[in-house]
Image (cartoon, grey):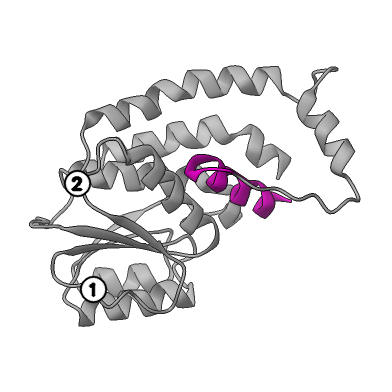
Amino acid sequence: MSQAIYDFPDHIQAAVKIGDNISLNHAYNGIQNIVLAGMGGSAIGGDVARLLAKNELNIPMLVSRNYTLPNWVNKKTLVICSSYSGNTEESIAAFDQAQDKGAQIIGITTGGSLMERMHDLKMDVLAIPSGMQPRAALALSFVPVLYLLNKVNLVGSDTINEIKCAVDLINLKRDQYGKEIVENPTYELAQKIYKTLPIIYGENEATSILAVRWKNQL
């Protein structure tokens, strides 16, 4: 996991490359709300995407960690089914419900049942690289969501440009907090909480998402 964390800037660059090459086969019109259906790292990716897009996104976006979709989902809802493996039960169930409700659907996955079924139905599904722990694939969970929202004209280019600009800053922070650095505050903190039960919480939307991510990483 430490190597996956170290490689996070590289994951973002890979996700940006995927995003730059997205081509959708269908038009998505009249969207009034968004649901991202996912679990674990895919859901956290949805949380991060929603947070980063909030200054440009003018319609509600909900991250659903459940087998069922909200009753208000309809043909004017964009449902993004995100499952790293493509076999997450909750995401598959949400996909079935989204079809029943006539929602507009896009998938994000490495393969599995979700990709197979969406291909069979000629739906848009974005393929992301496999071979990682799902919780380590955070960049591949949130960056493609932002690109998809941009492609369907729900967010502008500012959000995408911010992601691209962030790579240099994240690389800098990686160098500052690398494991070879003697005085490393991240490792000092890790030693302090080792064999303890830390209480981690956030006081607003941004820090709450970070708190959930941190807890999931422990």
Rendered view: 30 above or below 207: below
Mark 2 closeness class: few <14, some 14–19, many ≥20 residues within 10 Å? few
Asked where in the image residue 126 lies, by quadrant, the reply is bottom left
Residue range in magenta is 203-218
Query: Which residue is at the front of the view, 196 or 101?
Result: 196
- Give the labeled residue for mark 2: 23
Residue 7 got which mark?
none
- Earlier-in-chain disc, 1 versus 2: 2
Query: Which residue is at the front of the view, 82 or 155?
Result: 155
Tell me where residue 173 appears, x and y as whole percent: 62, 21
Query: Which residue is at the front of the view, 143 or 25?
Result: 143
Instruction: Label 1, secondary structure: give it.
Output: loop
Tell me where residue 21 appears, x and y as whole percent: 26, 39
Q: Residue at x 50, y 53 (%)?
A: 44
- Give the labeled residue for mark 1: 72
Side of 181 where 77 appears, left or right: left
